[in-house]
Every structure is written in structure tokens, then in C-alpha cells.
Amino acid sequence: MSYHNPVLLHESVQALSIKKDGIYVDVTFGGGGHSREILNHLGEKGKLVAFDQDADALQNKIDDERFVLIPENFRFISRYLRFYGIKKVDGILADLGVSSHQFDEASRGFSTRFDGDLDMRMNQKSKISAKHIINKYSEEKLSEILFLYGELRNAKSIAKTIVEEREKEKIDTSFQLKKVLEKYLPKAKEHKILAQIYQAFRIEVNEELEALKEFLSQTPNLLNENGRLSIISYHSLEDRLVKRFINSGMFSGELEKDIFGNTNEPLKKVGKLIVPSNAEIKQNNRARSAKLRIATLKK
């Protein structure tokens, strides 16, 4: 729990409708909270495969013969399940948020609270860090990232300021970036705007939306009949992709209909959108923006 306080723990695991002898996948292992809860519901013949690309998370590995932890990004889910001889699974869980550990470890550069290196890499073997993007990307590219991933209306102005200031001095740390952008950070909205800026750079560093699309696209072919998909998202960009894929099997465009007016989307949603209770938000403020969507194969 000190590494990461899992959000919507019981709701997201309950959504999997776990069978004692089933095969399940937790694609965002983190502190292992969701994985431990899944294992609690599995019998001796059950199996759980987990993924996490962050080396820090691998220290939380669970000593259980029913459990396998794969140190990779969930975008490679099919490839690695095949490697372990698994073609189909009974449920897949994804918690798309940044872990508490990543936020609280200053050196990782995810938090606006600490004066850490502008890193933001979830996989620390990756070559591109936030520092590289901020100091090397063109003004146009920076503007595009801030607008698309941070949803900032003044993205062009922010990008222009970054480029002007980095010519005077390289921008290496969180507090340097904050100082460079202070004219865009009125006290009442400072935290919110900084969070949007950090979100934009983090998504670019980790290719988060591309990885999410690749992962979602593979899930229908991996699920057994009656298999469940349980996904927790934290911001509108990823939630939009999850919602749209569950509803249509697509990320853009319109569903095509056959001559009888039928569509061929692979999934169907189960139940309604689930959000954390006020009690959970009070206990864990990072849960406040979480949304849980559940789906199963369309028959």
C-alpha cells in the first residue's frame, strides 16, 4: 500500500467475475494491489499473468506459483502471452494511472511538487525523457503536444516561451520549468495548469495513447467467451479511447452496417460507468478522477 494505494480495488476485480480455475491478466502491476486481490479469488489451478515496464514495480513481485510477472509494456500483451503458451484468457484488468510511488519519488520527475530531474519515463530504459522533449523538440511540435495531450488553449504561447527560455539556459528540472512558465500559472490555477503541462509531456514520453490503442485492439482476440475487460482510466483522453473502443471497436470514424443494419463491434459494455465513492476519495485523493468501464465479448 505504501508503494501504491490501488483505486477501485474491489469494484475492478469484482468486474472480472473470476472463475477459480481461470486465467487472468493484470496489465498494470505497480504495487501489486489488484494482482493480490485477483489471486485471493483464484483456486489452486487458476493463473495470473501481470505486466509492468517500470523496474521499480518488479521489486513488488508476488511469490506465488500461480503468478507470472512480465517486465514489459502492455502493448505487447499478445506476444508475451503466446510465449507462455496462453492463447485465451478469462479476464484482463488495467489501471491506467501513474502509481503513487512514481509521483512520490522526486527523481522520477512525475510530480510538480518536487524539484526533480524532468524524466517521466515509466520504462527507464527508454531513450526519450521529458527533458529531451522540452529542450530538443521544435516549437511547433511542443505546441501540438501541449494542445493535444494537455488540452491547453494557450499551447502555442507556452511552447514559444519554452523555446525562448531554453536558448538562454537548458531546462533540466521541475522547478526550472515552473519558473520559466510562471506567467501562465496564476495562483488559483497553478496546480491544475501544471498538471496539464506535465500530463502532456508524460503522455508523449511514454507513448501512452498509442500503447493504449495497441493494447485495446488486441483484447477481443484474447478474451474467452464471457471473458471480462476491466479498465480504470483517469483523464478524458484515455477514457474517451476506452469508451469508444468498447462501444464500437474503433478509435475514430463511424461503424459500418451490413445490409440488415447490423454492426460488428467485438465488445459490449457491462453495467454502467463506476466511479469511486466519496469515502474512497477522502481516503485516497488520487482516486477522484478515476472511471471504471467494464466490457465482455459480444455474442
Image (tube, helix red, strand yellow):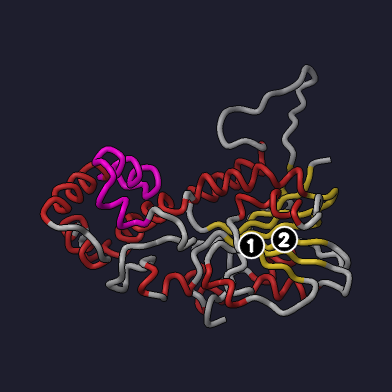
Nearer to us in this view, 21 or 250: 21
Q: Is residue 4 magenta?
A: no
Picture layout, residue 236 above or below residue 117: above
Which quadrant is the C terminus positioned in? top right
What element does badge 1 sit on? strand
- The residue indicated by pointer 2 is 25
Which quadrant is the N terminus positioned in? bottom right
| Numbered badge on residue 146 | none
How far from the left and from the top, in percent, is residue 74? 61, 55
Q: Residue at x 72, y 74 (%)?
A: 37
Sequence-wise, which precedes: disc 2 or disc 1?
A: 2
| Numbered badge on residue 51 | 1
How far from the left and from the top, in percent, is residue 132? 31, 53
Picture layout, residue 42 above or below residue 134: below
Left/right of residue 280 with respect to residue 160 in the rendered view? right
Q: CA distance from mark 2 to mark 1?
A: 8 Å
Q: Which residues are magenta?
A: 129-154
Q: Amino acid at mark 1?
A: Phe
Left/right of residue 166 with respect to residue 22 in the rendered view? left
Q: Amino acid at mark 2?
A: Val
What element does badge 2 sit on? strand
Q: Residue at x 78, y 45 (%)?
A: 297
Q: Residues within 10 Å of mark 2 (few under 14, many from 20)?
A: many
How far from the left and from the top, in percent, is residue 153? 29, 44
Q: Is residue 130 magenta?
A: yes
Q: Residue at x 72, y 50 (%)?
A: 295
**Circles 2 and 1: CB atoms closer than 8 Å:** yes
By secondary structure, the bulk of the magenta-drawn segment is best described as: helix
